[in-house]
Image (spheres, rainbow, N blue to C red):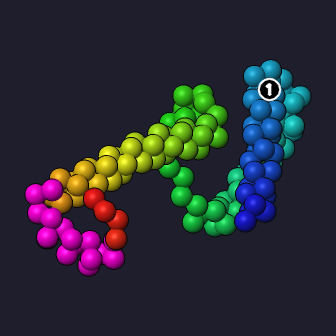
Amino acid sequence: MADKFEAIESHLELFIENTRQLGIIASDFKPQGQNVLNQKIHKMITDMQEIDKLKAQVQDVQVPLEVFEYIDQGKNPNLYTKDCLEKALVKNEQVKGKIDAVKRFKNMLIVELSKSFPNEMAKYRALRGDDRPT
C-alpha cells in the first residue's frame, strides 16, 4: 500500500519542482529562453498526465476534512492524528470515570436494597451466583 503513495508522492514532488522552475523562468523571461519555457510547459503537461494515471490507485483513500483544515492553517497533518489520539484518551478517561461511578452506585444500591429487602436480595444474589455478603 505504501508503494502507491510513494509513486504518487514522487510524481507530485517532480511536478512541484518543475512548477517552481517554470515560475522562475517566467518571472525572468527573456526571448532567448522561449525554448526552455516551452520544454517546461510540456514537462508539466506530461507530469499532470502521469499524476492523472496514478489517481486511480488512491481513489479509495478517505481523508478527513479536518486534515485539510490543518494544512490550511499551516500545521503538520501528522498533528491531526496526535490530536485525535489525545482527544480519544481524554474521552476514554471520562467514560472510565462514568463506568466507575455507575459501579459504585450499583454496589451502594445493592447494599441499601439488601437492608430494606433482605429476602428478595438474597434471591437476586442466588440467581446471579453471587455469594458475597452485602
Image quadrant in which you'd find residue 74: top right
Classify 10 Å Cα crowding around label 1: few (below 14), some (14-19), many (20 and above). few
Q: Is residue 42 visible?
A: no
> Which quarter of the rendering shows the C terminus?
bottom left
Identify which amino acid the numbered label 1 is placed on: Ile
User: Over which residues does the magenta segment extend?
Assistant: 115-130
- Position of 62 relative to 30 (above/below): below
- Magenta stretch, main secondary structure, is helix
Q: Is residue 27 visible?
A: yes
User: Is residue 58 part of the magenta span, yes or no?
Assistant: no
Q: Is residue 43 left or right of residue 82?
A: right
Q: Residue at x 27, y 77 (%)?
A: 126
> Which quarter of the rendering shows the N terminus?
bottom right
- Position of 125 relative to 113 (above/below): below
Q: Position of residue 25 (x, y in %)?
A: 81, 28
Total number of numbered labels?
Answer: 1
Q: Name, please, the residue furthest toward the left.
A: 116
Mark 1, secondary structure of its residue: helix
Q: Residue at x 15, y 65 (%)?
A: 118
Q: Position of residue 100 (x, y in %)?
A: 37, 48
Q: Residue at x 75, y 40 (%)?
A: 16
Q: Position of residue 106 (x, y in %)?
A: 26, 55
Between 98 and 56, the one lying in front of the other is: 98
Q: Residue at x 28, y 54 (%)?
A: 107
Q: Is residue 8 left or right of residue 102?
A: right
Q: Position of residue 131 (x, y in %)?
A: 34, 71
User: Is residue 118 part of the magenta span, yes or no?
Assistant: yes
- Position of 62 relative to 29 (above/below): below
Look at mark 1 in the image and give the residue it sits on: 24
Q: Is residue 73 left or right of residue 29?
A: left
Between 117 and 35, the one lying in front of the other is: 117
